[in-house]
Amino acid sequence: MGVATMKSTRGVKHAAKGAAAPVAGEVWRRRDLLGLHGLAPGEVRALLRETQRHDEGGSAGERPLEGRFVANLFYEDSTRTRNSFFVAARRLGADVLDFSATGSSVSKGESLTDTARTIEALGVCAIAIRHSAAGAAEMVARAVQCSVINAGDGRHEHPTQGLIDLYTLAKAHGRLASLDLGGLRVAIVGDIEHSRVARSAAAGVALLGGSAVCVGPANLATPEAGAAGCEVTNDFDPVIEGADAIMMLRVQVERGAAIASREEYVAGYQLTPERAARMKRGAIVMHPGPMNRGVEIHSDVADGPRSVIVRQVAHGVPVRMSVLAACVAARAGAA
Ligand code: CP
């Protein structure tokens, strides 16, 4: 069974619904998901197999978190991640405690770990945390006993987004059965420097055997910003024809990103219809969102035939179902 300690009739349902059977060596035993960097390929594949099962309806009727509470602990704004954790938890049968730092006792000076322990004391089995500080999720994981899922911590990692990107890529390129991205090349383009999405995506692509190249202006795609396993270049045009996927990133001005001029940025790094027309047959356009249309991506490309951006959002639910269920089950198994 792919995900450790999940006690159900899932093996039967795999066969009944035609989803891929669990593969030896693909197992998840961690209480928390804090990042993709450092995971084993089999751990990532275990989560993605479960994602496929949820995505294809193989888990319909299962409610492994029935009667439990999952907490969203969000110190930064979010549309996709927060709401898809909510939907995922509900699909698993859980209720959701939806905490926002705004309007909470954080304004009275309560620390992150005291807040997390307070939320845990209310009886939650998992906390999904988003915070502006790199390392915040790990700090919370050390402070509590329940499962902790990193929903984005500063510039560090956004592992569930990374899993969404891997799943979307594998599905679009017919690699769900193998979960092997060997031979596929992903260009990650834009503000690499401030992007936790780039770090998780690059780490995940490398784990599954693909290659990634990070592209952006010199101040936003430094050699140091090259995420694990990612080449870095400041020249977008030469990488277009060779990419099987181009993932565009927003310029994160709220984290201090600066561009010399919008016109120069658009000229050098926007995925325009002209650039998209040079992409190879079958290559896809990705974006984790939120998009700034007219800056990093032209509206016609965002809504065009190569775009899988809406599919990425939809995959957020089965990915987060997979992660929540697996981490809570692993914690229960270890207790
Ligand atoms: N991709 C992503 O993290 O989007 P949100 O900020 O809306 O959650």
Image (spheres, rainbow, N blue to C red):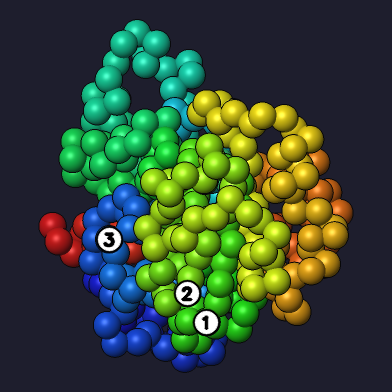
Is the C-beta separation of discs 1 and 3 under 8 Å? no
Amino acid type, mark 3: Gly
Amino acid type, mark 1: Gly
- Residue 201 in picture, x, y percent from top left: 48, 59
Q: Which label was assigned to residue 183?
A: 1
Residue 87 in view of the camera: no
At a point 31% along the width and 46% down the height, the residue shown is 148
Sooner in the amino-acid sequence: mark 1 or mark 3: 3
The quarter of the image that holds ligand 1 is top right
At a point 81% along the width and 53% down the height, the residue shown is 272
Label 2: which residue? 210
Residue 248 in view of the camera: yes
Amino acid type, mark 2: Gly
Label 3: which residue? 38
Classed neighbour count for the residue bearing mark 1: other residues with Cα under 10 Å, few (<14), some (14–19), many (≥20): few
Q: In terms of secondary structure, where does tag 2 sit?
A: loop
| Cα separation between marks 2 and 1 | 6 Å
Q: In this rendering, would 107 be left or right of 247?
A: left
Sooner in the amino-acid sequence: mark 3 or mark 2: 3
Q: Mark 1 against mark 3, which lies toward the viewer?
A: 1
Closer to the camera, 57 or 209? Answer: 209
| Cα separation between marks 3 and 2 | 16 Å
